[in-house]
Image (cartoon, rainbow, N blue to C red):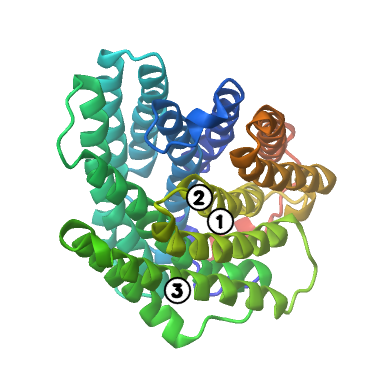
């Protein structure tokens, strides 16, 4: 791996990101259980309460927890900045987000307005605490890289969608909806997918692909302009959506074009990587590129079909692209964290990153996940299949949780048995 440009000495305590990573698959399992007991026809409507609950169990509970956990780890390492009191901040934010997500799921599912209102407050606090802390941390950045620009941009989008999301959720709590409720919901979802998650993934890819996969570095134009062009497209889409809705498809095609270009670039760079060994994380990145290509095409033409297939678009982009990359990142980041923190303590007898997770189990989890995505799309046309693929999704997420826990247990078991130290580390520190 290429660790050039990493500020590993500023890494946060391992517990800060791990609590987010360990919780994320549990919310995905919960989403799978809710799908299992739902009706496929009801879930085909994006505005049904069941669809909203399941969507946010995945987007906040899984994707949000993984992205925030990754940011807690990556900001100090990739950007070289410290989040003030990161241990306390991440813990408080985690508690708010954990209970806020649970309150949202059960408040909406069982139509309990007080719990739904409480969820709005908890989620608002949880996201704002961490997002604002991260944005404030960037004040100390001297050298602004492409990855840092993407992170800052993504966090600003996250700030906006958090405020919008709290408003939308509170509307369900009080039972009053503004005339622009569906417009806000549409902006909230598009900016969450492309503005926050999409731009964040692009920024992280600039560094992760060359570092973990020894892939060719991204071209200067891509690193300098793509995030700006996508941001311009999202703002243009908002303007057209509000005032000239008939022409909003133009902006959608603009946004889709650059995400398709990014997906294609990722696929090509993985093929050109110098380290040709393939693992499940490469499969996840490649499948993500394919799903994003299909998803952007479907999203671009969906306006001409009266948004009839918006659920399929969501599965392709939200599930196939974002979920795939988040899963792949977990398989890389968690073993890296365990290895790095044990190595930093001077332990010698520790497994390599590649040996911390059973490769057969990770491949089985990947197959179950991809099968579930394809099955969910088929269920849109054949509703009776939904329960079958809900089960494969639950199994996939259960295996993912097991794999993550297995790697984390290596860390705590190693601390407990205290293997031999590499005394040279302490010698170097004494000489300094």
Q: Is residue 228 left or right of residue 94?
A: left
Q: Is residue 136 left or right of residue 268?
A: left
Q: Position of residue 82 (x, y in %)?
A: 35, 55
Q: Are marks 3 and 2 in contact (CB under 8 Å)?
A: no
Q: Residues within 10 Å of mark 3 (few under 14, many from 20)?
A: some
Residue under the image location 36 percent in, 18 percent down: 107
Which label sits in the foreground, 3 or 1? 3
Quadrant housing residue 424: bottom right
Q: Is residue 213 above or below residue 312?
A: below
Q: Is residue 216 above or below residue 102?
A: below
Residue under the image location 39 percent in, 27 percent down: 49
* Residue in front for this viewpoint, 349 or 402: 402
Q: Residues within 10 Å of mark 2 (few under 14, many from 20)?
A: many
Give the structural element (helix, strand or loop) at label 1. Answer: helix
The residue tagged 3 is 257
Q: Are marks 2 and 1 in contact (CB under 8 Å)?
A: yes
Q: Is residue 155 visible?
A: yes
Quadrant housing residue 276: bottom right
The residue tagged 1 is 321
Q: Residues within 10 Å of mark 1 (few under 14, many from 20)?
A: many
User: Which residue is most to the right?
Assistant: 360
Give the structural element (helix, strand or loop) at label 2. Answer: helix
């Amino acid at each position: 791996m290429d660790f050039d440009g990493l500020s590993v000495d500023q890494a946060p305590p391992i517990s800060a990101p791990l609590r987010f990573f360990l919780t994320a698959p549990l919310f995905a399992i919960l989403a799978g259980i809710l799908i299992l007991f739902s009706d496929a026809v009801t879930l085909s409507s994006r505005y049904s309460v069941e669809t909203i609950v399941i969507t946010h169990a995945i987007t906040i509970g899984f994707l949000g927890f993984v992205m925030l956990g990754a940011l807690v780890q990556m900001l100090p390492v990739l950007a070289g900045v410290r989040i003030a009191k990161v241990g306390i901040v991440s813990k408080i934010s985690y508690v708010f987000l954990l209970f806020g997500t649970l309150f949202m799921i059960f408040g909406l599912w069982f139509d309990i307005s007080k719990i739904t209102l409480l969820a709005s407050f908890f989620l608002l606090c949880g996201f704002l605490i961490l997002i604002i802390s991260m944005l404030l941390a960037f004040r100390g950045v001297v050298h602004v890289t492409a990855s840092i620009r993407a992170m800052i941009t993504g966090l600003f989008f996250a700030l906006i969608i958090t405020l919008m999301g709290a408003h939308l959720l509170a509307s369900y709590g009080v039972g009053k909806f503004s005339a622009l409720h569906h417009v806000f919901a549409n902006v909230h979802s598009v900016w969450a997918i492309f503005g926050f998650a999409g731009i964040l993934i692009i920024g992280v890819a600039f560094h992760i692909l060359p570092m973990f996969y020894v892939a060719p570095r991204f071209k200067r134009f891509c690193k300098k302009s793509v995030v700006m062009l996508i941001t311009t497209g999202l703002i243009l889409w908002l303007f057209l959506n509000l005032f000239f809705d008939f022409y909003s498809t133009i902006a959608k095609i603009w946004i889709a074009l650059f995400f398709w270009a990014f997906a294609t670039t990722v696929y090509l760079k993985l093929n050109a990587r110098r380290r040709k060994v393939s693992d499940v994380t490469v499969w996840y990145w490649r499948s993500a590129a394919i799903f994003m290509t299909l998803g952007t095409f479907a999203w671009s033409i969906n306006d001409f079909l009266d948004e009839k297939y918006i659920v399929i678009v969501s599965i392709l982009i939200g599930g196939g692209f974002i979920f795939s990359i988040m899963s792949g990142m977990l398989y890389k980041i968690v073993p890296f964290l365990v290895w790095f923190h044990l190595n930093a303590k001077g332990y010698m007898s520790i497994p390599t990153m590649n040996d911390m997770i059973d490769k057969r189990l990770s491949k089985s989890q990947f197959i179950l996940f991809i099968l579930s995505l394809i099955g969910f799309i088929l269920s849109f046309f054949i509703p009776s299949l939904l329960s079958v693929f809900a089960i494969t999704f639950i199994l996939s997420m259960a295996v993912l949780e097991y794999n993550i826990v297995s790697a984390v247990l290596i860390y705590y078991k190693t601390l407990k048995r205290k293997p031999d130290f590499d005394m040279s580390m302490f010698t170097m520190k004494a000489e300094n």
